[in-house]
Structure formats: structure tokens, C-alpha cells
Image (tube, rainbow, N blue to C red):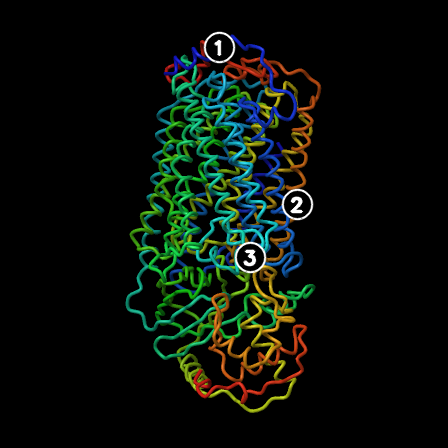
Amino acid sequence: MNKTKQLFASLILTALGLGTAHADYTLNLMKGVTKVSNDIYDLHMLILWICVAIGVGVFGTMFYSIYHHRKSKGHKAAQFHENTTVEIIWTIIPTLILVGMAIPATKTMLELNDIEKSDMTIQVTGKQWYWDYKYLSNDIHFESHLDEQSEKTHRTKGADPRTVPHYLLNVDKPLVIPVKKKIRFVLTSADVIHSWWVPDLGWKKDANPGFVNEAWTYVEKPGTYRGQCTELCGRDHGFMPIVVVAMEQADYDAWVKKTSEQQKQKPDLSDQTREQLLAHGESVYLKNCVGCHQIDGAGVPGLIPALTGSAKVTGKWENLDGFLRAGTSKMPKFDKLNGKEFAELMTYVRNNLGNKVGDELQPKQTALPDDDDE
Amino acid sequence: MSAVVSEHDDHHADDHHDHGPAKGLLRWIITTNHKDIGTLYLLFALAMFFVGGAMAMVIRAELFEPGLQFVDPAFFNSMTTMHALVMVFGAVMPAFVGLANWQIPLMIGAADMALPRMNNMSFWMLVAGVLLLASTLFMEGGAPNGGWTLYPPLVLQPITVGKAMPFAVFSVHLLGISSIMGAINIIATIFNMRAKSMKMMDMPLFVWTWLITAFLLIAVMPVFAGAVTMLLTDKFFHTSFFNAAGGGDPVLYQHIFWFFGHPEVYIMILPTFGVASTIIPVFARKPLFGYASMVWATGSIAFLSFIVWAHHMFTVGMPIAGELYFMYATMIIAVPTGVKVFNWTATMWKGAMTFETPMLFSIAFVVLFTMGGFTGLMMSIAPTDFQYHDTYFIVAHFHYTLVPASVFILMAAGYFWLPKWTGHMYNEKIGQLHFWLSVISVNILFFPQHFLGLAGMPRRIPDYAVQFADWNMISSVGGFIFGISQLLFLYIVIDTIKGGTGEKVSDEVWEDAAQHSLEWTLPSPLPYHTWTTPPTSVPTEHVLDAH
């Protein structure tokens, strides 16, 4: 019969696909690069094959029956409707299978939970819509945003995502960790609930505002591992990826040295050309403003005010500057930006997005005395 | 008590034996007849099935290719949110209440539901609730877009919800009151109006599963109403139930929500089990295998549904003892669920099967629901759920348990009982075409989503990395075919009501159906009032000592 063949064929194809697909990214779970992720992969395959076996048994019986016990073949219906022995058997056997599954699952669960004896700790803070990473041992602290190319592509109608390398899975600054070190993560959020997931590490963990969750990883081999936020966190939930770069200890040490030095550098307050201001301003805008006010500055009717034609934007720059630094109950304050970024951003929003004030602001004008301490 | 009621009913029935329905449109507004109200529920559910389905089409169109083509991400989020709310509260639940309205009195030999006026009121409150919800689509800031789970703090954020949030909350209140009234009515009917000759363990499985479902509804709908009311006071009256800065906890909401939410998903599947257990024996020409164990399995699943809620929250950050407890408790559900699947298989075994459309949909239900059960079992393993959680893997899982399970069984029930209700036979050829198109396209739609989830695609995203493109396109194609195929069902329903094939159906409709359940002993089409005199004997195939 059609149905029998078709369902068997799909079942077999599925089983083959899943069985041989561990190298193929698009069909099965990845093994990942940690012991825990490998244990999880093994658990996944074990339970999958148990399900396939039960499925073959149950569906096989059913389809045998559908094929042979049909009226059109003249089969006469039996009238049995009970069999205590059979019913006890098919209650006990699944119970035993479940107990068999629970044992390795419990072991892996305990392993995942073992936060003790970590070598370093990284604080992960989810924000709408990027990640904020803070290394608690060496004061490195940075934001990790969706890369500019993906940002522009997904916001532009007709742009082709296939031309963007790692579309939506790339960031401006990845999280860098050393290999063969037990790294503890403490996760929290500044606004709504996010969830931090890198499939290769084997787990995801929610970042809850006002609370701290813990998790850990121990990456065996250097590489770049990508993931995404997995808890709906608002309109740009799909646009806050995670990139983890695992390095050999020596490379990691060099990265720490370089990054700390960069972090200590004061922003360059020298004058820029109008083109430079506008280009840099766009970058600042794409990182900080575009999520709400949109790529064309139109905002969202009823929710987010437009920047195009806004008196706040096109009025006296000193007022705009004060507004951005202070924020409101609806808009976060942006005092994290330095004087250089303020100049670039304000020049951009006043002379782009449909606004034409015609001025340009230089970093020296907008810098406050303590601005450059980051 | 039940004796008094039925005597009164007999008397009443004798007085007004040939009362027909009121004339005109008013009939449908003021009706207290269980058949009319059942029809209203079913037609409303069918309409909402197409509304919710249209939203799903928007989602699948946007996901057809990577990049944003048609909608804004916030509107996309509104669509996923509203699709879920409309399908759950507007389509699947009301459809089963509609079936209960039609079938429970017929199956237990009752003249009507126990509380007919309340019955009318619960239907119209449902309409009000769903209209209130739908009205948010046209509000400034759009419909709710924080997911159907309405998690705070997202759902409280001004930039996320606009003006829709209080309307969504009041809509949930109305829907909750409607459901609770419907549930009370069903319980009162089954306990008080059942023919004296029918013992509890003689009741058809559909009646049993609805009885248990009704208790679930009464237990959990108030919990949901409480949770959304706390959202409302957090938003407008400065309470801090879910706000950490005020001493609250956003995760508390998730615990409350899923204490409602897990039984809620069983509210949508237990009556499904009941219908499958009704249809399969008729077409296998055999008594249901393991009647008693079916009843106990349903009861166990209902009980377990109250103590497994946090398996929706394995990644939320729970103490290890909690994670392990919820993992073990969840795994146990596989046992009674397995019993049911084995019993259906054993019912078919050595039967004399024929494969009319209701049977085809029921067999597809058993197979595809079991697939959803398998992925459910996989996700009960907490550490593996750390990978599956909030990906397309779970989207595939719950759609397998809802679409080719609940929805297919609702279709099966339509094909099975429409001839009885209307006295007209549906067009079997178009029915079979509808079945094959549906069963093939539903798998093209949802099976690839397993791959997407395992490969790392999160759910609830409007745009995705390019390596997910192929399976998304295939899934969308399946979705479009599935969506269009359902118009055939709409056609068949209308056609059957209007006269169908023109063939006059017998009272039994299906061969020997009267041996299985009481409604087939009544005339076709059903008169406006039935069982004005309760039946004196009931089919005994389920009785334990009949063997």
C-alpha cells in the first residue's frame, strides 16, 4: 500500500540521514567541542535510536495489521479487547528503558552543574540587542554587536544575505577565551530575559534581569564557535548573535594585553573631516540606535519616535547632547559613549536620516573633561 | 439527584415534544440547544482556524528565504504570538468544546447539557474574548508581540507592547471564564444527566477524556488568569511581582504560567485521545482494546501534567534537584502515553479494517502523534534539552502534537459525525484527497524543522543565517500546500451541510456503529431534541466482564 511504503521510506531515509550526518551541519545535532557537548550528543543519539527502534516496532506492527487485517481482504474481526499480561509487559518495559536513560542523563546533568574550581570568570549581560562581556579577572569589558554588514543587509530591502559572510552569525567583537581552561560564566540581563547559546559548547542558559545564573565550559580545541540569543527578547531578538573565539593560552595572553591597552587609551579627540564624521557616526548609530529608531530614522509608529524631522534632533546640539547623556524613562542614557562618539553620532543624525541641519560637530566640542575615561 | 433531573426532563419533553428551533438569525443568538451551540462552537473554531492559519502563512512566507522580505520584525513577532493564541484559544479548544456539546449528551443519553443558558453565555463570551484579542491587531503599536507565553519583563516593556497588553489580558480573562463555564457544564452534564443504565465505566472514551479535561480546565484557567492579572498590576499599579528591582522575580511568572501551560497542552490532546478511541474501533470493527487502561492512562497523564511544568524551563537556572526531579517526572509521562499508542495498535490488530476518511485521519494521528511523543521524550532528558530548548526542534515537536494530532482528529471527527448530524454523506473522494494532501504536506512542513532545530536555528526569529535556507524553503512550501488543502475541508463541510452526495445515510451511518456508542441508535439526521426519554440500555462492549 502507498502509505506503508511511503512512511517506511521516509522513516528509513530519516534514520540513515541522522545516523550518518554527524559531519553534516544541516541535519543532526553537532558534537561540539567540549566533553559535556559530546556527552549530550551521545545521549541524544541514544534516545534517538531508542525512539527509532520503538517506532519501527510499533509502526511495523500497525502497518502489518493495516495491510493484512482489512475487510477488503475478507479478514474477519477478532473480538478480543483485553489482555492483562500484554498490558503489564508494555507498561514495565518502557519503564525499564526510561530508568536506563535516566542514569546517564543524571550523570551529564550533574556534570553540567559542577561550577566548582574554575580558572576564570566572565560576566555575560544580555541587553536589547547585544551582549556585554566583562572579564572579572582582568577588567576587560566590551560590547559585542551584530557585525555592520549583517546589520545593514537585514535592514535593507532587497539586499542579498548570501553575499554576507556568516550572515547574522557574526559580531564586531567576539568573546575570546583560552582553550583547556575551565571558564565560569555568570549570566544576567539589563532589561528583558535573554538566553546565551553556543551549540558547540553544549548548553544554553537564560540571562534573567536582577538574577545571576552560572554555567561553565572547557573548550578542547581552538576555533570560532557561533550561536544566537534563544529567548524572545523583542523586535531584534533574531539579531544578537554570539561568537566565541577559543585560543591557545599564549595567543589569549597576547589578546588580553592588546585589548587592555586599547581599553586604557584615551579617545582621539582630533578634528575629522565631514565625511569621516558621517561615516563614523553611522557606525555608532548602527550599534546603539538602529534597533529602536530604525535604519531610516523613521522609528516605529506608536512605539518609537522618529528622528527624521524631530525638533529634539535638529534643535540646539547642546540640548541633544544633554538628552542623550541623561536618557528618559523610555530611552536608555548613552553616557557610555565618549566625546568622539558623541560628535560623530550627532553629526550623523543631524545631517542624515532625512535631516539637513548642515552643521558638523568636532570631538573637542562635545567632549566633557571626564569623558575620555571610558 | 440524577433521577430527579431526568424525570423532570421527561415531563418537559413530553409537553413540548415537537419544538423546533426559533426562526431566523435570533435562533443562533439565543439558542440553548446543545446541538446549535455545538454548531456555533465548531463553525467559530473553523473560522479561527483559517484566521490563525493565515497568520502562519505570513510567518512561512517571511521565512521562505533569508533576509527580511515582507514584514517588520515586530509584526513578525505579533504574528507568532497571535497565531498561537488564536489557534489555542480560538480554534482547537473551542472545536473540542463544540464536539463535547454535540456528542456528550448524545453519547450518555441526555436530552441536553445540564446548564443550557450558561452554555449559550460561555459561547458568546468566547466570541467576545477572541474579538477583543483580534482588535489589538489594529491598535497603535500592534498586537501583542512578546510570544503567546507573555513573559515579563518583555511583555511589560513600552517599546514592545504598545497599547495591546491590557486588552490581551482582559481577553484572556474572558476566554478563561468561558472555558471554566464550559468545563463546569460538561462535568455537571456527565455526572447528573447520564442515562441511569450507563455506569461510569460504560462511558465512551470521548466522554471520559472530556470529563478529565474539564477538571484540568477548572484547575488551571484561574491560575493563568491570576498570572496575567499580576502582569496587569505590575504594569499599571506599581506592584513588583515579576520585577527584580522591586523584590519580585521574572522567573516566578514562568512557574505560574507553565503550571497552567502544561495542563493546557493536555487540554488540547486528551479529548483527541477520546475521539481516536471512538473512531478506530468502529473502522476496525472491533471493541477498543484495553478500555480500562485507557481510562487510567488518561487519568495518569492528567495527574502528571500538574507536576512537570518546569520542563519548559530547564535552562532558566534551577537548582540541580529541581532539574532532576522535573526530568524524571516528565520521563514518566511516556509510560501512560505509550500504553495508549499500544492500545490503539492492538485495537487495529486482527480487525476487519476499512479506510474511510475518518479512519485515515485517525491512523495518521496515531503515527504522527507518536512522532511528536518521541521528540517529547527526547526533550524530557534535561541535558539534551539544553541543546533543543527554544529551537525549531521544539517548534517541530509541539506542532506534531497539535497539527497532525489535535487538528487531524478534529478533521476525523468532522468526517465521522457530520453525516450523523446533517443526515448527508460527505464526498468520500474529496475527503480522501484532503487527507492525502494534508498528511503529505504536514510532514513536508514540520519534519524539516527537526533538522533546523538540531542545526541550531532558534525559534521566533524573522530572519536566519543562510545555512538554514534550504530546509526553511521546503518547510514553507509544505506550509503553503497544507494551508491551501484545508480549503477542501471548508468546501466539504459546506457541501455536506447543503446535501453532500445526496445519498441518504442510515441511522448507523457506519457499519455496526450502534454497537459502539449510543448516538448511532438515533435517527439521521438528528432531530432537534434527542433522548427526551433516556435510553434503557447502553452498548456493553466496554464492560469489563463482557468477555
Q: Residue at x 70, y 64 (%)?
A: A158
For disc 3, the marked residue is: B461
Chain to which mark 3 belongs = B
Q: Is residue B64 above or below residue A278?
A: above
Q: Name the kind of residue labelled 1 in the image.
A: Thr
- Residue B163 placed where, x, y %? 54, 54
The answer to which image quadrant residue A121 occupies is bottom left
Do badges 3 and 1 share one subunit? Answer: yes
Chain under disc 2: B
Mark 3 vs mark 1, CA separation in Å: 57 Å
Viewer-closest of A255 and B342: A255
Q: Which residue is mark 1?
A: B533
Q: Quadrant of the N terminus of chain B?
A: top left
The secondary element bearing badge 3 is classed as: loop
Kind of residue at disc 3: Ile
Mark number displayed over residue B480 = 2
Q: Are marks 3 and 2 in contact (CB under 8 Å)?
A: no
Left or right of B436 on screen, residue B41:
left
Inter-mark Cα distance, 3 to 2: 19 Å
Can you say whether A275 is above or below B391 in the image? below
